[in-house]
Image (cartoon, rainbow, N blue to C red):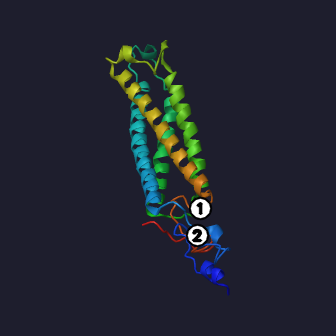
């Protein structure tokens, strides 16, 4: 073997990749993530933390919606709201259902990411992104419609601007309810963007949503689960 060829053959492989076309071209298409592992761990720690915040905000919103529904469905005949006739706000029901769905969703996804669990049906980044997109629409519709909803019979005072009646607890509750609705939407949007950018950057749409795997251990979709690489 010529001297130059021998030196090229003994050249050390790049540290950033677990395999190289020098030795295993059929494995290199399944290389690990090229960015540092501590960066990957930090990204998924942030995802779990944001899911935890979303869980808390959803619990608060659910409680506020329940308070509002209880008030409007138990109006006193002397109450000036809607002439004392009992009613309920449809958008509050929508926000209540959205918050309940989000509570279960955020708890499930946060547990999956933190514990590196791999489920048969709800496992990939694609599944997470689809769920987040649905929640994104539900939160956006609820927050936007609630912002432009008014209290009968005064149809010109929107929930988005109730400063004129903050002396009443019902107006303060609606203001806080609206604030948490928009905050929940912002958190869902942040989670959607984080997971989408991570999946695009690492071509991980069909990989486990916890984002920490060793593609050399097995082929995803087989009988064996991927080996976690970030502890």
Label 2 Cα crowd, 10 Å radius (few <14 / some 14-19 / many 20+): many
Element class at badge 2:
loop
Measured along the vertical axis of the image, is residue 53 above or below residue 211?
above
On screen, residue 27 versus residue 188, left or right, reads right
* Residue 182 in view: yes
On screen, residue 63 versus residue 197, left or right, reads left
* Residue 78 in view: no
Measured along the vertical axis of the image, is residue 32 above or below residue 179?
below
Q: Nearer the viewer, residue 34 or 78?
A: 34
Q: Nearer the viewer, residue 213 or 12?
A: 12
Residue at the image position 60 percent from the left and 80 percent from the top: 7
On screen, residue 31 versus residue 42, left or right, reads right
Quarter placement of the C terminus: bottom left
Percent position of residue 155, x then y: 50, 13
Instruction: Report the number of discs.
Output: 2
Percent position of residue 1, x then y: 67, 87
Sequence order check, earlier mark of 1 and 2: 1
Measured along the vertical axis of the image, is residue 119 above or below residue 178?
below
Percent position of residue 174, x then y: 41, 25
Mark 1 or mark 2: which is in front? 2
- The residue under label 2 is 215
Numbered label attached to residue 105: none
Numbered label attached to residue 207: 1
Residue at the image position 58 percent from the left and 37 percent from the top: 137
Question: Mark 1 to mark 2: distance in Å?
Answer: 9 Å
Q: Quadrant of residue 32?
A: bottom right
**CB of mark 1 within 8 Å of CB of mark 2?**
yes
Q: Nearer the viewer, residue 44 or 147?
A: 44
Spot the residue most to the front.
3
Element class at badge 1:
loop
Residue at the image position 38 percent from the left and 29 percent from the top: 176
């Amino acid at each position: 073997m010529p001297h130059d060829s021998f030196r090229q053959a003994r050249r050390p492989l790049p540290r950033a990749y677990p395999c190289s076309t020098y030795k295993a071209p059929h494995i290199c298409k399944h290389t690990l993530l090229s960015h540092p592992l501590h960066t990957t761990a930090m990204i998924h720690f942030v995802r779990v933390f944001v899911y935890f915040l979303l869980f808390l905000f959803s619990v608060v919103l659910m409680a506020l919606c329940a308070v509002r529904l209880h008030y409007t469905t138990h109006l006193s005949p002397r109450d000036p709201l809607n002439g004392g006739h009992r009613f309920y706000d449809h958008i509050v029901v929508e926000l209540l259902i959205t918050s309940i769905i989000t509570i279960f969703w955020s708890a499930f996804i946060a547990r999956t990411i933190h514990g590196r669990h791999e489920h048969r049906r709800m496992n990939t980044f694609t599944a997470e992104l689809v769920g987040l997109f649905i929640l994104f629409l539900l939160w956006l519709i609820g927050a936007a419609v609630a912002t432009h909803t008014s209290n009968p019979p005064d149809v010109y005072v929107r929930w988005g601007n109730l400063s004129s009646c903050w002396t009443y607890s019902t107006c303060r509750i609606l203001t806080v309810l609206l604030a948490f609705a928009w905050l929940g939407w912002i958190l869902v949007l942040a989670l959607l963007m984080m997971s989408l950018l991570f999946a695009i950057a690492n071509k991980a749409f069909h990989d486990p949503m916890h984002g920490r795997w060793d593609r050399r251990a097995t082929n995803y979709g087989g009988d064996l689960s991927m080996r976690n690489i970030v502890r």
